[in-house]
Amino acid sequence: MEGYVCIVQENQPPARLQAELAEGLTRIGCELLGDPPEGVQIRWMKVSGGFGFTAGAPSRASLVARSVPAGYPDAERETFLTRVCDLWTEVTGCTTNDIVVTAIDGPLPL
C-alpha cells in the first residue's frame, strides 16, 4: 500500500478541505506513480497549537511526505513535487512558503 504522511498544524487545513486534498493526492499518485486508487493511504498528523513556530510566530506550514521508487528520475520527481505543491496551494489558499513536499526514496513508515 502506497501512501502519504501529511503533517499539518492544528486546524490547518480545515477538516472540510482534507477530503479534497486526499482526493488530489490519490489522483497524483495514480497518474504519476501508478498507484491503484483503492491502495493509497493518507495519514494526517496534527501539530497541536503552540508547538509549531516559523520565524517566532505560530506556524501555518504543512509538510507532505511520500515515498517513491529508489532511483526515481529527477524530472518525474520534480513534476510530482510541483503537482503536490500546486494542489495544496490551490485547495488551501496557502502560499508556497507554507507547504513543504518531499519525495523519499524507499518506503515510508506508515
Image (tube, rainbow, N blue to C red):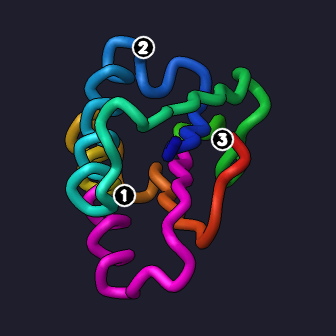
Is 70 rendered above or below residue 90?
A: below
Give the image location of residue 108, x and y in percent: 66, 53
Q: Which residue is mark 1?
A: 96
Q: Is residue 66 magenta?
A: yes
Taking depth in this image into account, of 42 and 100 the one nearest to the observer is 42
Query: In this view of the protein, which residue sits in the foreground, 102 or 8?
Result: 102
86 in relation to 26, above or below: below
Identify the residue at horizontal 46%, vertical 52% (top origin): 99
Query: Element type at marker 3?
Result: strand
Residue type indicated by callout 3: Ala
In magenta, the rendered stretch is 62-83
- As helix, strand or loop, the secondary structure at mark 2 comes to helix
Residue at 51%, 85% in the rendered image: 71
Binning the other alpha carbons within 10 Å of mark 1 as few (below 14), some (14 to 19) or many (20 upward) gives: few
Name the side, left or right, on which 82 lies relative to 48: left
Q: Choose top left, top right, bottom left or bottom right for residue 88.
A: top left
Residue bearing the label numbered 2: 15
Q: Earlier in the sequence, mark 2 or mark 1?
A: 2
* Three-letter amino acid code of the residue under disc 1: Thr
The mark lying in front, picked from 2 and 1, is 2
Nearer the observer: mark 3 or 1; the answer is 1
Instruction: Please give the residue where the numbered disc 3 appears in the rendered image.
Output: 57
Specify the amino acid type for callout 2. Answer: Ala
The Cα–Cα distance between marks 3 and 1, rounded to whole angstroms, is 17 Å
Of the numbered discs 2 and 3, the one sitting upstream in the chain is: 2
Q: Position of residue 16 (x, y in %)?
A: 33, 12
